[in-house]
Image: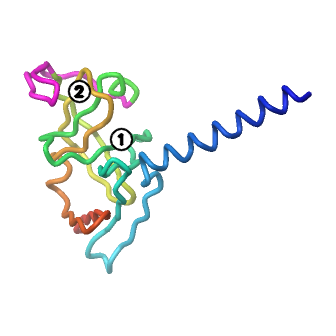
Amino acid sequence: MMILAMVIGFGLLTNFFQGVLDTQNNPNQKIHTTQSNNEHIEIVLKRNRSGHYVGTGIINGQKAVFLLDTGATYVAIPEHLAKQLGLKKGQPLSISTANGRTTGYQTNIKALSIGQIHLYDIKAIITPNLEEILLGMSVLKQLEFTQRGDVLTIRQYL
């Protein structure tokens, strides 16, 4: 009985601390949206413990976690996630990444959402050896963003 209690206790502690770590890595798991008199939609992202802006959104109807990357020309999707998101490999192309040159594949995202910001027909690249989705300039150029302290405010004008 004592061993069972210890196993349950360790399981609960593991679950609790995993939740703490997940929140530190992605403090924007639930993104609050405001709308200003039909002028614009605004979301606010908090910086994570590593100094990056990470947020949870939707790609083609499925939950996805993004890392905002102004250095990425397109949205970069890891190859292992592309299939789950219903993305098909298109034209191959040579791309430069932090890990060097590789071959990526053009694709198109039908719908992408962050909070109540909705974008459609987004150019993206399926990239091997990538761990997370990079939200690049093919999305960010359609939005206005301002950083102050540990907060990034993103606006979509209507």
Q: Position of residue 30 (x, y in %)?
A: 47, 55
Circle 2 sits in a helix, a strand or a loop, which is it? strand
Q: Residue furthest right?
A: 1
Q: Which of 31/6 is in front?
A: 6
Displayed quadrant of residue 25: top left
Quadrant containing the C terminus is: bottom left
Examine the rendered structure and indicate whether residue 157 appears above or below residue 13: below
Structural crowding at the residue carrying mark 1, measured as other residues with C-alpha within 10 Å and reported as few (<14), some (14–19) or many (≥20): many
Amino acid identity at mark 1: Ile
Q: Which residue is mark 1?
A: 59
Q: CA distance from mark 1 to mark 2?
A: 13 Å
Residue for point 23% across, 34% down = 76
Q: Nearer the viewer, mark 1 or mark 2?
A: 2
Residue for point 16% across, 39% down = 74
Q: Which residue is mark 2?
A: 126
**Magenta-highlighted residues:** 85-103
